[in-house]
Amino acid sequence: MTPPRLLLAPFLLLLCFAILLPALSSPSGSPSGSPSSSLSRFDIHGWRWHSLSLRRDCLRLASLASLHEADPSRCSLGELREAAEFVDGFNHGGLRDVEEHLFFPWLEAHAFSGRYPSEPADAARAREALAELKKRKAALAALSEQLPSSPPPAMRALSLSMSSSLSSILSLQDSSLVPFIADTVPLKEQSAFASRVVRRLGVLAARAHLVGMRDAAHGHPGGEEGRLFEERIPGIARKMIPGWRRGMYKKRAGRLEDVRAEEPGGAA
């Protein structure tokens, strides 16, 4: 006789997918109070929030490195390196994997293939933006790969440099690619992309990433990203986030959870 736990496993896996699939994209429609008209027609917010989450973690890693330098008894070198592994391997690694294997090929197939009509000049500008984005992403990866093995002062400098690079990357994405995707690719096609992301990341990793996205969106200046997160992420997923934070995210993020994301100028 099959043990009850094994009988429940497929059901629980399907339930996890049912919660996470809509959570990594957003429901169709134009919510009130969205940051811009482009964002109201854009459904792949998990991509934007993942970059925000990575930037936040870079700032937190810089703060943790400063804590270690000031008093190693408050943060050991081992704890600092574990945090750096989380930033490079888990957070940035997950973003790179999704972009390189799913998102960029998806863009080619849906936004640039001629499958949907677009102005030639707009498509040309978007292609230029994508090429520039890939260059900046490659430079970011070169910095990130140095994090785990760098001494604390260099780790702090690298983290701050990554944060600055991510600011420029986010600006490029939101000013060029987000409007083009919003104007070109139907919402239904955008939303369908989320299921592939969850399968690529895995259910457990996707949960942890969503926790980081939530914190980054709510911590973003102005409050618009936080409001967008609350509007676009289904209520059942939002209710699960505290449990996912306690159950898995804190174990992965380690000591990063004990420090704030301090901007270079001193603001959190």
Image (tube, rainbow, N blue to C red):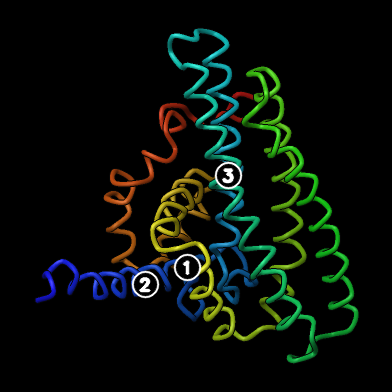
Q: Tell which circle, 1 or 2, labels the residue nearer the N-terminal end.
A: 2
Q: Do the CB atoms of the residues marked 1 and 3 lie less than 8 Å apart?
A: no
- On the rendered structure, is 123 left or right of 251? right
**Residue lying farthest to the front in this orientation:** 1
Classify 10 Å Cα crowding around label 3: few (below 14), some (14-19), many (20 and above). some
- Give the labeled residue for mark 2: 17
Q: Quadrant of the N terminus?
A: bottom left
Looking at the image, tell me whether mark 1 or mark 3 is earlier in sequence order.
3
Identify the residue at horizontal 69%, vertical 39% (top origin). 145
Q: Which x, y percent locates residue 251? A: 37, 39
Would you name the residue on which mark 3 appears? Answer: 89
Residue at 49% over, 43% down: 219
Q: Residues within 10 Å of mark 1 (few under 14, many from 20)?
A: many
- Find residue 6 and report its image quarter: bottom left
Q: Are marks 1 and 2 in contact (CB under 8 Å)?
A: yes
Residue 198's disc is 1
**Mark 1 and mark 2: Cα distance apart in space:** 8 Å
Q: Earlier in the sequence, mark 2 or mark 3?
A: 2
Q: Looking at this view, is 62 or 178 the one in front? A: 62
CA–CA distance between discs 2 and 3? 23 Å
Residue mark closest to the camera, 1 vs 3:
3
> Which label sits in the foreground, 2 or 3?
3
Q: Work out whether residue 77 or residue 187 is closer to the camera in this orientation and state it.
A: 77
Q: CA distance from mark 1 to mark 3?
A: 17 Å
At a point 56% along the width and 30% down the height, the residue shown is 61
Identify which amino acid the numbered label 3 is placed on. Answer: Gly
Circle 3 sits in a helix, a strand or a loop, which is it? Answer: helix
Q: Which mark is residue 176?
A: none
Q: Quadrant of residue 186?
A: bottom right
